[in-house]
């Protein structure tokens, strides 16, 4: 193996470059992985655009990318004792956690109390080097094995799928309940598949264009928010009662307020959307109707179960991967993803080229 690798490095705000950098060293309880697929996340572009100065990232340069899959090529000290082997096919997520604070010990390591302390906490592609690179060294806590019948492109999407699963589980969804998925981006579409697998009754989804059509194709009842009033539609469909669970994936003030007005009394809004700025919500209604409002950060302990569900819906999930590019074509990949061009949905970059 050579000592250097190709990587997309953010050298300053709004300055992403393809560079030749050193292959990372493998630490204790880590593995070195050859990255076959890295899926573009909207957060990647937000970091590039300096949405979170001093937070994501803490400093420059940094290699972005946190939705990825690959294969283990080297084991760190002790990694084999936990069942890991060279050649294992794996999917990765961003968060690790310090492993020792109260929240980590309770399994809530995505809200680690030592978050951001680089010497004891890691978050790949955000404050720690990520997966837009030929190789990544990662904690064995941040990976899971993927089945042989799952492509690396789909395995790279296990991070957002496991995040959507955490959001739905946080809501307390019960079999037979009606739900609204607010937003028909990737997270919203993944939520259609997951909510159906978890026993939801009618699954409504708001959105527009080809993404909304994909939601209908997956079995959801589509609501085009550009042509219809989402709140009126839901209230008419539920005899004025609203839906018990709303999964908020828009990240817009309109979408968040719609969620508050379509949820039934005693219901729950579970959200993974992250607006750039805070938005106003009808707190009086939330209090008087006893509405639960759950923030859902990332994917604590949901990756293995997300893989199990995804393995039962491979064809549907594969259809959401619309574009695949070599790492050299990263500018075109980001342009298509950010502009939602060519009916793009999930756009994948291949750091090590295309598998044979």
Image (cartoon, helix red, strand yellow):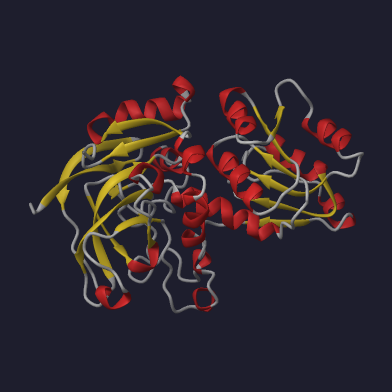
Could you say which is closer to the camera, residue 245 or residue 87? Answer: 87
Q: Is residue 107 above or below residue 307?
A: below
Q: Is residue 148 left or right of residue 250?
A: left
Q: Quadrant of the C terminus?
A: top left
Based on the displayed image, in which of its 4 quarters is residue 183 positioned? top right
| Residue 141 against residue 179 in the figure, above or below | below
Q: Nearer the viewer, residue 16 or 25?
A: 25
Q: Position of residue 297 (x, y in %)?
A: 56, 57
Q: Nearer the viewer, residue 313 or 49?
A: 313
In the displayed structure image, the side of residue 45 where residue 213 appears, left or right: right
Question: Where does the image place residue 75, in percent across and percent down from the top left?
Answer: 21, 68
Looking at the rendered image, the quarter that the N terminus falls into is: bottom left
Q: Residue at x 35, y 49 (%)?
A: 68
* Rendered residue at 51%/38% (across/down): 316
When asked about the image quadrant of residue 28, the answer is bottom left
Instruction: Let me know if residue 287 appears in the view.
Output: yes
Q: Residue at x 42, y 43 (%)?
A: 47
Decide: is 240 above or below 119. Answer: above
> How many dots with numbers?
0
Q: Position of residue 231 (x, y in %)?
A: 81, 34
Q: Is residue 276 visible?
A: no
Query: Could you say where residue 132 lies in the image, as x and y percent from the top left?
Result: 29, 44
Q: Residue at x 77, y 46 (%)?
A: 178
Extreme left residue here?
2
């Amino acid at each position: 193996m050579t000592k250097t690798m190709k990587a997309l490095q953010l050298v300053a705000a709004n300055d992403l470059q393809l560079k030749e950098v050193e292959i990372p060293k493998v630490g204790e309880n880590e593995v070195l992985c050859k990255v076959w697929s890295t899926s573009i996340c909207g957060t990647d572009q937000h970091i590039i655009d300096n949405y979170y100065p001093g937070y994501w990232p803490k400093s420059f340069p940094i290699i972005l990318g946190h939705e990825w899959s690959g294969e283990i090529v080297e084991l760190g000290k002790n990694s084999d004792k936990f069942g890991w082997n060279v050649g294992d096919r794996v999917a990765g997520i961003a968060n690790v956690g310090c492993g020792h604070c109260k929240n980590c010990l309770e399994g809530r390591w995505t809200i680690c109390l030592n978050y951001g302390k680089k010497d004891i906490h890691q978050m790949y592609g955000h404050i720690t080097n990520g997966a837009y690179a030929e190789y990544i060294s990662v904690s064995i806590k941040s990976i899971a094995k993927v089945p042989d019948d799952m492509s690396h492109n789909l395995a790279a999407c296990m991070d957002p799928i496991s995040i959507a699963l955490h959001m739905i589980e946080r809501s307390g969804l019960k079999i037979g309940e009606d739900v609204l998925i607010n937003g028909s981006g990737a997270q919203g579409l993944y939520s259609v598949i997951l909510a159906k697998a978890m026993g939801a009754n009618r699954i409504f989804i708001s959105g527009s264009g080809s993404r909304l059509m994909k939601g209908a194709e997956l079995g959801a009842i589509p609501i085009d928010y550009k042509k219809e009033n989402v709140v009126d539609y839901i209230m008419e469909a539920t005899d004025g009662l609203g839906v018990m669970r709303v999964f908020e994936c828009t990240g817009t003030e309109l979408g968040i307020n719609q969620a508050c007005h379509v949820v039934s009394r005693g219901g729950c809004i579970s959200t993974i959307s992250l607006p750039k700025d805070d938005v106003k919500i009808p707190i009086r209604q939330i209090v008087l109707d006893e509405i639960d409002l759950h923030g859902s950060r990332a994917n604590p302990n949901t990756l293995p179960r997300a893989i199990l569900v995804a393995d039962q819906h491979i064809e549907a999930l594969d259809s959401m991967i619309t574009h695949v590019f070599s790492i050299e074509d990263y500018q075109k990949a980001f342009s298509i993803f950010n502009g939602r061009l060519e009916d793009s949905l999930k756009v994948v970059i291949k750091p090590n080229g295309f598998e044979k």
